[in-house]
Each structure stands twice: as C-alpha cells, then as structure tokens.
Image (spheres, rainbow, N blue to C red):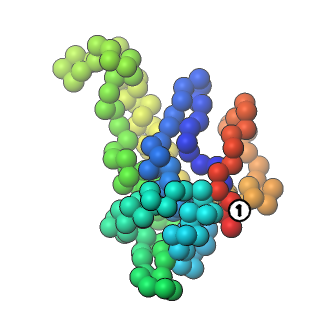
Amino acid sequence: MTIMGGCNVFGMRMNLTKEADYGVRAVLDIAGHHPDLRTTRRITAAMDIPRNFLSHILATLVRHDVLKSKSGPAGGYTLGRPASEITLLEVIEIIEGPVGVDECILGGGTCDWTGPCPLHHAWAEAKASLANHLATINFGDLADIDVAIRTGTYQLPDHSPPHPTPPPRLGTSD
C-alpha cells in the first residue's frame, strides 16, 4: 500500500510527518481487516512500520476513540467506530495537529500575523481547501480503494495524474 510519505503536486512537495504517515497506514490496515483484531506485529509487517513508532501512535488513536484495543494474548486493535465515520483529516490532525497556516509560504519571508505577505491569503485558502477535502475522505472508501489497487481493478480518476515516476509501494496489506 502506498500512502503519504510525499507527493509532488504542481511542482510542490506535500508531505506528512512519519508519525502521521504511519498512523494513516495503521488505520487503513485495521479498516481493511475490520472487524477482526489486528496485532501490532501484523500491522508492522503488513504496512512496513517500525514497531517502536507504532505502539505510541496506536495508543494516541485509542485515546481519541479512532481505535479500540484489547489486551492479552488474543488482543489487538480494531476500529473504534465504522470506517466510514473516520476521516483522513481526523487521523492526520490527531497526530500532527490542525492543518492550517502556521508559517509563511515564503520560508522566512515577510509574513507575520500583523503584516501578512502578498501570498498569505491565497495560501491560507489553499490549505483550507485541502483540509476540507481531506475531511470528505473516509477510511471505508480508502480500504475499498486499497483492495481495488491490489486486485488491479482500480481506475485512477481522470483529474488525478499519475506520478511521473511510480513511488515504491510500502506495505503489503495482507
């Protein structure tokens, strides 16, 4: 399963932190196996996530009711509510914090909260549009897309150009 890590959009790189990338992968894996419990070992193996990162991320997602955990030898993780009710934005913001304008697009340019730069409003609108779009994407749909990709039946929408160089596919989503 290839998810996040980095995407080149209109010549700009858009990245999630490693923690958010791993959180999205973990929730996608768990959604794809729901209602079965998924162990940390199975998630790390299927989604190519270092185990030391995963335990902390899963605990955070449990605290926010995205996941439920069951202790013991027959334990593991499952979704805290239906996959269709868990959005991509929610998982990203639980791990990274709010998606919004927190620094000047000019990278140390003239922008501050009392005197914004000329790009401030345009960039703030673009980030708000991105957040609004991510809020419409749920893990039920993402799990279905993942199955379609793995079975070769997924058709990339016309308005979504493919990567110029295919990125490596991370995880196997067993």
Q: Is residue 108 above or below residue 148?
A: above
Crowding around mark 1 (Cα neighbors within 10 Å: few <14, some 14 to 19, many 20+) is: some
Instruction: Indicate the quadrant where residue 161 lies.
Output: top right
- Residue type at mark 1: give it: Val
Q: Residue at x 69, y 48 (%)?
A: 169
Q: Residue at x 47, y 65 (%)?
A: 85
Q: How many marks?
A: 1
Instruction: Indicate the quadrant where residue 156 lies.
Output: top right
Instruction: Indicate the quadrant where residue 12 lies.
Output: top right
Helix or strand or loop: what does disc 1 sit on? Answer: helix
Q: Residue at x 48, y 74 (%)?
A: 77
Residue 113 in sight: yes
Q: Residue at x 34, y 32 (%)?
A: 101
Residue lying at the far right of the rendered structure: 152
* The C terminus sits in image quarter: bottom right
* The N terminus sits in image quarter: bottom right
Q: Is residue 48 above or below residue 133?
A: below
Of residues 130 and 147, the one drawn nearer to the viewer in this rendering: 147
Q: Specify whether 9 is left or right of 76.
A: right
Q: Specify whether 78 is left or right of 65.
A: right
- Tell me residue 139's x, y (percent): 54, 61
Q: Is residue 73 above or below residue 93?
A: below
- Tell me residue 133's x, y (percent): 49, 45
Residue bearing the label numbered 1: 147
- Tell me residue 104's x, y (percent): 34, 23
Of residues 62 and 111, the one drawn nearer to the viewer in this rendering: 62
Residue 135 in sight: no
Of residues 75 and 162, the one drawn nearer to the viewer in this rendering: 75
- Tell me residue 166's x, y (percent): 73, 38
